[in-house]
Image (tube, rainbow, N blue to C red):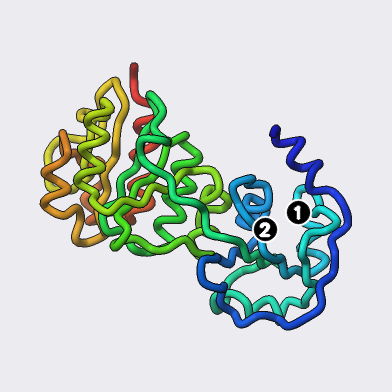
Amino acid sequence: MAKGERKRAMRGRAGRMQGGRGSGRATPGHVRLWGRHAVEAALLNPARVHRKLWATREGVASLDGELPPDFPVEYADVTDLARLVARDAPHQGLVLECEQLKDVYIDDVLEEGRPVVILDQVTDPHNVGAILRSAAAFDAAAIVTQDRHAPPESGVVAKSASGALETVPWVRVVNLARALDTLAERGYWRIGLTGNTEATLAEALPAGPVALVLGAEGEGMRHNIEAHCDALARLPISNAIESLNVSNAAAIALYAVATRAT
């Protein structure tokens, strides 16, 4: 369905539901999203199954397109909405509860020439959300994380991603090293970003598809993950600062891949 058709499909009058305000936590198997960009992207995502929207009338009016006439909406004021989300979360008059996205697999998302971002124990949901946003901006095929060492899908991730949670595949794997082996088999050159090397990213970039591997701030990549990289590279930052935030580093690296000489 084209974007314009999706917008038209959202037009209509929102229904009104009676009942309580919610507990402030999504039910098991569901996720609660907030903020206009995150909610709007989820509403337009055909892969999402929606349960309920709590909203102010101004929040609904801010959507790019309107809701179907039978969409489950409960109108509420700003104070009530604040009880449904994380403390001080900027909900912008919109809180959506929906089912979590279905699992995706690495073999199903790889597209020739598009970079992949591998995150090794990056656990801050704000960072993961910001990396999703950069991945969308620079046309990455996916981000890949390990199940046990990454944040769950959440409103914080979605708000930081500004809609990209709905458009960039997020592959969760049991074994990150095995996922890197799969990428190598598919022709990806795996570059681990670290400050402990002389080669710059520009020097390490090949002409073919690239997997960018980033570790947690401070600790960096684990030794086993670093050993599964084809090359290590650094961003040529000034000596005035020790390192970059991991989401900033991911954005710069993705820009470098997008603008490399061919």
Q: Where is residue 32 in the image (x, y as percent from the top left)?
A: 58, 67
Name the residue rendered at 49%, 47% in the picture.
Answer: 133
Q: Mark 1 points at which residue?
A: 63
Residue 36, numbered label: 2
Question: Do tag 2 and tag 1 residues touch (Cβ < 8 Å)?
Answer: yes
Give the amino acid type for the residue marked by disc 2 in the picture.
Arg
Q: Give the position of the C terminus as an image quadrant.
A: top left
- Location of residue 25 (image quadrant): bottom right
Out of 239 and 67, give the one closest to the viewer: 67
Q: Where is residue 91 in the image (x, y as percent from the top left)?
A: 64, 68
Instruction: Classify residue 114 as left or right of residue 9.
Output: left
Badge 2 marks a residue whose secondary structure is helix
Q: Position of residue 75 (x, y in %)?
A: 80, 72
Q: Residue furthest right?
A: 13
Mark 1 residue crowding within 10 angstroms, few (<14) / some (14–19) / many (20+):
some
- Location of residue 70 (image quadrant): bottom right
The answer to whether residue 143 shows anywhere in this view is yes
Name the residue rendered at 35%, 31% in the picture.
Answer: 257
